[in-house]
Amino acid sequence: MPKAKHKKPPAPPPPSLASGATLTSKFAVAVSVGALIISLFSGWAAWYANGPFLFPSVKLLDSGENGRPLRLNVVIQNNGKTPARRFNALGVFTITDSALPFNPDYSHAVTKPMVSEIAPGGDTYTIEPFPRFNAKDLTDIKSGAKTLWIYGKATFIDGLHMSHEMRWCFKAFQGSKDYSDFLFLTCDSYNGSK
């Protein structure tokens, strides 16, 4: 019986112009997808960099002269480009004879109900009024025997639903020789965000 001859399979055709075009179109799609991802990331990064920028400050309501009690509040202003949502803050004052660092104690904090948002462009949130100070406290602060610290923290979420915590601390200084007002300068520590 004669042996059957096996035929060799035909050789693949040489690359043609059509297969080169397919390869080029695949490369173009990959480059377009990469450019789209970079564009989306750049837009997100630019938006996030211009997110909520919260700036706390202390406002003196009454300097405590002529037998009136010293009164103050804390104002938090959003100078950013996006809102700070589900904003909740609390503030504390303490009068001590020690310098920082101290352990923040929020058990006697002044609080306000949470607000849905602090709008961008200068909208404010005010923690007020802080408890009034008595005459002895005022005398001790003015004489330098004790230091008035105002500190607090706030939580909020940004437009990307990321949670943030902001902390602040201020120390009271005499603003004039006759002690008719106070200046509130930021502390060397405790301020910041996370």
Image (spheres, grey):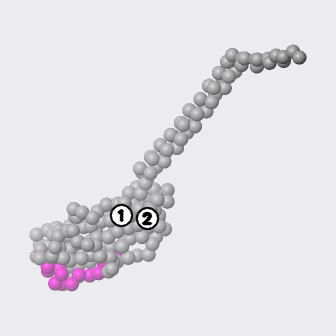
Mark sitting earlier along the chain (2/1): 2
Callout count: 2
Identify which residue is drawn at 18% across, 81% down: 137
Q: Which residue is mark 2?
A: 156
Describe residue 96's horizontal placement relative to residue 89 as left or right.
left
Point out residue 79 in the picture as x, y percentages from the top left corner: 38, 57
Q: Quadrant of the N terminus?
A: top right
> Is residue 189 among the parts visible in the rendering?
yes
Report the front residue among 145 and 38. Answer: 38
* Mark seen at residue 27: none
Residue occupying the point 53% across, 36% down: 35
Q: Residues within 10 Å of mark 2 (few under 14, many from 20)?
A: many
Tell me whether circle 2 and circle 1 mark residues in contact (CB < 8 Å): yes
Image coordinates of residue 139 in percent, x first then y, are 14, 80
Residue bearing mark 1: 166
Mark 1: amino acid: Met
Which residue shows up at 70% across the image and 21% down it?
A: 18
Q: Is residue 126 above or below residue 67?
A: above
Q: Residue at x 66, y 26 (%)?
A: 22
Between 191 and 174, the one lying in front of the other is 191
Q: What is the residue that sits farthest to the front in this orientation?
A: 1
Residue 25 locus on image (x, y percent)? 64, 28
User: Percent from the top left, x then y, of residue 73?
Assistant: 31, 73
Q: Say which amino acid is labelled 2.
A: Phe
Quarter-of-image position of residue 53: bottom left
> What secondary structure is found at the residue carrying circle 2?
strand
CA gap, disc 2 and disc 1: 8 Å
Q: Is residue 123 magenta?
A: no
* Start-end of magenta stretch: 127-142
